[in-house]
Amino acid sequence: MERSLIDSIVAALGASSSAGTGAGGSRVVRGIGDDAAIVRSGGALCVTSVDSMVEGVHFRLSGDGSSNPYDVGWRALGGALSDLAAMGARPGEAYIALGVSTAVGETRALELMRGAIELADATDTVLAGGDVVSAPVLTVSVTVVGWADSEHELVGRDGARVGDLIGVTGRLGGRTTRPMPRLTEGLALARAGAHAMIDLSDGLASDAHHIGERSHVLLQVGLPRLPLAEGVTDWARAATAGEDYELCFTVPPTARASVERVLRDVGDIQVTWIGTVVSPGPADGPNPPGVSLLNERGEPVRLRGYEHSW
């Protein structure tokens, strides 16, 4: 499973993944474990994320018309930029590597790039380079680079504290084909005092768990509180569908009014308060660090977000 392999890679890297024991490793501020890595670059901080999409796994171009190349290009860049939003970084540059099959060809590959170019223009992102190779199926790998002046400007997954409120932007469960990454909102939330943040790419059930696990706390989420996207009628789908690319974050109660104000000021963005952060139980007992999803009767419900398997 995807999560298991990531955990195994982290274990194989050992301390070098976070402490930077290799050559130049002292430049690494944050390694594996957040939405993006943070590396010192001169006097600034370079925030980098890599995201990949593969035909047949993340999208389909054939027959049923479930995706078109333009939307694939937009979504590939949008998903990567959403990682920068979750860190509160300013957008900078993007690099796109395409693996193009003979079935896709040059015309449709160019259409894919047009989708990415439009989103780059809309988000002040510079497409600075990339690569093109032949491949059995269409693949898109995007590297995005964001910037910050200080580590204190950025937010990770590991800062949630007992007593924090849990909020989400926008509405959940809609799975838009052209997501608009919440870059401005991520910056605003970081400045308003967010303790922890993540983008909802795999579904709230999985992504909120990452915050709890990394912060060694338990996020208690009331499922009936979830803001449902148009056409979504049940909170189970809203919690598990994935590809919302909204932001889930925790803030101290004293920051609630400030968060509501700044999100309103940056674009009248809806914020919904869906729960609180509490002390967890032991890792091998009931209520370990992670997330507890509660139904309308306050009973825990077992749900999981999207995860690729092989």
Image: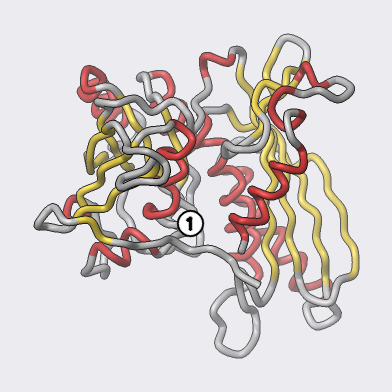
Q: Residue at x 77, y 51 (%)?
A: 96
Residue at (53% x, 31% y) in the render: 87
- Number of labels in the image equals 1
Residue 264 in the figure: left or right of residue 71: left
Q: Position of residue 269 (x, y in %)?
A: 30, 39
**Does residue 19 lie above or below 171 as drawn?**
above
In the picture shown, does residue 272 fall above or below 151? below
Q: Residue furthest top?
A: 43
**Relative to residue 252, is residue 19 drawn left or right?**
right
Say left or right for 17 vs 168.
Answer: right
- Judge whether 148 appears above or below 296 on screen: above
Q: Looking at the image, which residue sits at the far bottom? A: 63
What is the residue that sits farthest to the left in this orientation?
A: 297
Give x and y (percent) for residue 146: 64, 30
Amino acid at dot 1:
Asp
Quadrant of the rendered image containing residue 162: top left
Q: Quadrant of the C terminus?
A: bottom right
Q: Nearer the viewer, residue 219 or 152?
A: 219
156 over 305 or under it: above or below: above
Image quadrant of residue 144?
Answer: top right
Please report the residue visible at 77 percent of the width from the left and 45 percent of the height from the top.
95
**x then y, percent, for residue 159:** 44, 25
Front residue of 242/142: it is 242
Q: Which residue is located at x 29 percent, y 49 percent?
A: 292
Residue under label 1: 202
